[in-house]
Amino acid sequence: MEILVTKAIITAMKEEAEHIINRYSLTLKKEFNTLKIYEWTREVGGEKELIVLALAGIGKIQASIATTYLFENYDIFKLINVGIAGNLKSHDVQVWDVFIPNTFIQHDMYLPFDWAHLDYAKKAIFLDYATDQNYDLQKFGLILNGICLTGDQFIDNPEKVLELEEEYAADIIEMEAFAILSVAREYNALDKCVVIKAISDWADNDAKDAHMGNLDFAMQNSLVVLDIVL
């Protein structure tokens, strides 16, 4: 049976990827210096789907490399970024809640110019799937909107959190989503993208330990949502 649909997943950390690999019994197909590509085929409704996982590595550069590789080597029907994130509004959500944010900003980009041709780096990226309704899935909350900040910084400083929240009114912070979507935009494929981020920490002084300590629980909740999106 010919493969009709290819759905690609990108994640940054091997600890995140292991949950996805085990969930779907993925097989390693290609390995570069950092980038690793896994695949699995399944039949859904009489059609054969190819599920591809790119384990990219941490940060915007690695995320961009992985996303470009996927678009250059596969006919992507859907592109899903799955991972964990820090919470910038701890009074609104809890650790292990899951966001599907719709607004993405690169918070560590600074250019003191207002030229329109720099909007690709300075302006927010929007995805059109936002809703006004959130869901309580009993074990965790699912937030179907929100602002996600991306930068090549692990945030574990309460003063920095306050600064970012005041400047951007953002909900969560992580290190890859904006870069992934920037590449997808170049391929005119933003309508194919979904971002799933589970809260692992509060981006505070305890973030380093909480980030890893809560990763397994957060990723389990992410996979519940990933099953639905796939």
Image: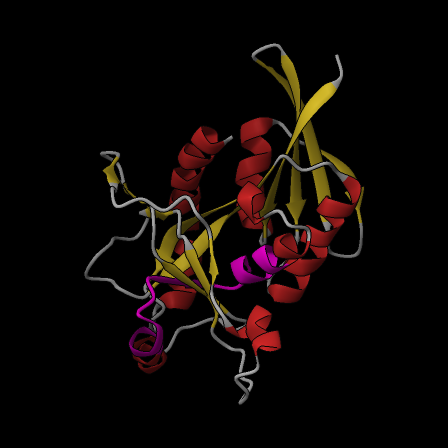
Side of 6 where 177 appears, left or right: left
Residue in view at x 75 percent, y 12 percent:
1
Residue 216 x/y as whole percent: 43, 45
The correct choice, above or below, for 71 with respect to 208 in the image is above
- Asked whether residue 147 is in view, the answer is yes
> As rendered, which of 101 and 175 lies closer to the eye?
101
Q: Which residues are magenta?
A: 164-182
Judge whether residue 214 can be spotted in this image: no
Q: Residue at x 36, y 46 (%)?
A: 130
Q: Position of residue 110 (x, y in %)?
A: 53, 83
Q: Quadrant of residue 201?
A: bottom left
Q: Residue furthest front?
A: 116
Q: In this picture, is 172 found above or below 32?
A: below
Q: Is residue 222 left or right of residue 192?
A: left
Q: Quadrant location of residue 167?
A: bottom left
Magenta span contains residue 165: yes
Of 133 and 59, the residue lying toward us: 133
26 relative to 121, above or below: above
Residue 45, position as x, y percentages in the image: 56, 12
| Residue 149 occupies quadrant | bottom left
**In the rendered view, does 20 fall on the left or right side of 86?**
right
